[in-house]
Image (spheres, rainbow, N blue to C red):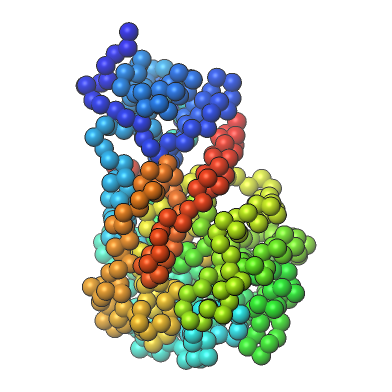
């Protein structure tokens, strides 16, 4: 005879469970996307959980274990509201101060798809603006602040090395004085990532770089040229080798559209031939049209399902697998990006502020200046309200805690597009495969 | 791998992975990456750093 639930509590199955089936003989596996817990159970218990038949489990001890892993929850809990609450908490958190610093909007490249409209402006940040940044950070630091996170961006930030040096001394020192950890990265086109600049970056606390390579040499050099039309691929790849040898963390970003997606396989093979592929993290972006600058390239753009299909067909994920690399457990994401984080902001060279990097150079999207940050400014507040959006179909999805499928906030804050831009059937199948691999790592 | 049998007095539920601490991601970078829900870790470009807080 089964016993009633402890203390008469009502229970129900979490919607965030993933059911992986019988992965070893008589061992049926369940994973929970919020807690990160994974369990092996017998078939009968597996079916009870999956069928939400958890009112009367045969052993009282099951409730303790299953609720610990959040596989079952109290019947009166609304899990989606819990996610919203965690999002609000993360957005309001002062644990992290985030800065994206654009020391210049000038750039030495003339990429075919660049959305920034001020690459010709060569001015770099003045001492007055840099001092205002330091004052801003100082004011933002609270007793609970634990991290100061800086991303150097632009334009091309390595055109303003003096600024990186100046703030690269002051900000880590400010963090140190307040017992805060300091992290810094840089997004650079890589052409000026010389050995001297790598040494400088490492000296000033920048230990991760993202560099864009858009294809094998011939493809990349058509898309990402110097302003005088010169080629860039060879210099970038040479610089990456040196940067890697000095311990710099490197991410290679590939911006995809119809003109280069078929050449990603050859690109990865070229990077492998140069001894780079297994030492970098490759990520992809989709070139998209926003702002007037981009309209001329709309015919070259890919849709997400279209890009998915091509990358799957080319088995790109197989090419990216590193020998011995372990699958990482999925991590719940409650903040998103600098735009949706309450304590993060982008600072332009004149001290102008933005919330979203896609708004850089767009004066209508500025939200004040670093001299007088206006957190009530509509262009600031509207990004933070994303956490309160009704997610519609996403509310029913098992992957809600870990999914970035809500997409880029720019879509619904600026472009007012439907946020349900999800290729769930494709992504969920791949996600389950990843969880199975995660399980097999333990056996 | 932690085994909850000590807690429950049974070996019917084996934890392959115990719960992880709730993670809040701080942001100084931009995510504008290929949206891939199966990969919830942001790339190097996003200056991922992690705050670990105890689950409630």
Q: Nearer the viewer, residue A11 or A93?
A: A11
Q: Position of residue A33 (x, y in %)?
A: 43, 41
Q: Nearer the viewer, residue A429 or A280?
A: A429
Rendering coords of residue A241 (x, y %): 69, 68
Residue A314 in sight in this render: yes
Please give the name of the residue rendered at 45% of the width and 24% of the height, measured from the top-left corner.
Answer: A46
| Furthest-front residue in this view | A299
Q: Is residue A193 visible?
A: no
Q: Is residue A109 above or below residue A430?
A: below
Quarter of the figure with the N terminus of chain A: top left
Picture coordinates of residue A305 (x, y %)?
Answer: 57, 56
Rendered position, B22 above or below A18: below
Quarter of the rendering occupied by the C terminus of chain A = top right
Residue at 48%, 81% (x, y): give it: A292
Question: What x and y, as percent, mark residue A397?
Answer: 41, 44
Kindly indicate the quadrant of the structure image that contains residue A271.
bottom right
- Residue at image position (59%, 21%) is A25
Which is nearer the eye, A372 or A150? A372
| Residue at x 66% of width, y 64% of height | A261
Relative to A9, A244 lies left or right: right
| Snapshot quadrant of residue A260 | bottom right
**Eyeballing the image, is A288 above or below A90?**
below
- Total numbered labels placed on residues in the image: 0
């Amino acid at each position: 005879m089964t016993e009633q639930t402890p203390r008469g509590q009502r229970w129900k199955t979490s919607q965030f469970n993933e059911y992986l089936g019988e992965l070893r003989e008589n061992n049926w596996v369940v994973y929970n996307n919020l807690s990160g817990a994974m369990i092996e159970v017998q078939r009968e218990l597996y079916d009870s959980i999956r069928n939400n038949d958890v009112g009367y489990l045969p052993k009282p001890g099951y409730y303790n274990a299953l609720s610990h892993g959040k596989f079952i929850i109290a019947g009166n809990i609304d899990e989606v509201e819990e996610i919203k609450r965690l999002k609000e908490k993360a957005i309001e958190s002062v644990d992290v101060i985030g800065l994206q610093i654009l020391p210049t909007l000038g750039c030495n490249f003339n990429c075919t798809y660049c959305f920034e409209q001020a690459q010709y402006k060569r001015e770099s940040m003045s001492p007055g603006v840099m001092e205002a940044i330091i004052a801003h950070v100082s004011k933002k630091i609270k007793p609970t602040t634990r991290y100061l996170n800086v991303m150097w961006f632009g334009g091309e930030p390595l055109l303003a090395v003096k600024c990186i040096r100046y703030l690269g001394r002051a900000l880590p020192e400010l963090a140190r004085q307040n017992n805060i950890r300091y992290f810094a990265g840089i997004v650079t086109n890589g052409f000026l990532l010389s050995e001297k600049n790598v040494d400088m970056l490492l000296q000033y606390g920048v230990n991760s770089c993202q560099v864009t390579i858009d294809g094998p040499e011939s493809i990349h050099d058509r898309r990402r040229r110097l302003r005088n039309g010169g080629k860039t691929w060879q210099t970038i790849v040479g610089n990456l080798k040196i940067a890697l040898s000095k311990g710099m963390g490197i991410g290679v970003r590939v911006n995809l559209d119809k003109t280069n997606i078929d050449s990603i396989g050859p690109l990865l093979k070229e990077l492998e031939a140069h001894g780079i592929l297994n030492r970098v993290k490759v990520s992809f972006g989709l070139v998209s049209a926003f702002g007037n600058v981009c309209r001329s390239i709309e015919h070259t753009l890919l849709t997400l399902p279209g890009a998915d299909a091509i990358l799957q067909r080319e088995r790109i994920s197989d090419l990216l697998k590193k020998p011995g690399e372990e699958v990482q457990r999925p991590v719940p994401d409650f903040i998103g990006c600098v735009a949706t984080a309450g304590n993060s902001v982008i600072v332009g060279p004149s001290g102008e502020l933005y919330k979203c990097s896609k708004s850089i150079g767009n004066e209508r999207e500025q939200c004040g200046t670093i001299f007088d940050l206006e957190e009530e400014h509509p262009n600031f507040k509207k990004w933070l309200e994303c956490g309160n959006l009704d997610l519609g179909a996403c509310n029913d999805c098992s992957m809600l805690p870990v999914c970035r499928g809500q997409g880029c906030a720019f879509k619904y804050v600026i472009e007012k597009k439907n946020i349900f831009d999800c290729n769930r059937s494709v992504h969920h199948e791949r996600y389950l495969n990843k969880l199975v691999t995660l399980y097999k790592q333990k056996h | 791998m932690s085994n909850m049998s000590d807690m429950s007095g049974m070996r019917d539920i084996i934890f392959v992975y115990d719960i992880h601490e709730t993670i809040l991601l701080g942001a100084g970078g931009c995510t504008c990456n290929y949206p891939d829900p199966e990969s919830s870790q942001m790339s190097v470009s996003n200056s991922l750093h992690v705050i670990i807080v105890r689950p409630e």
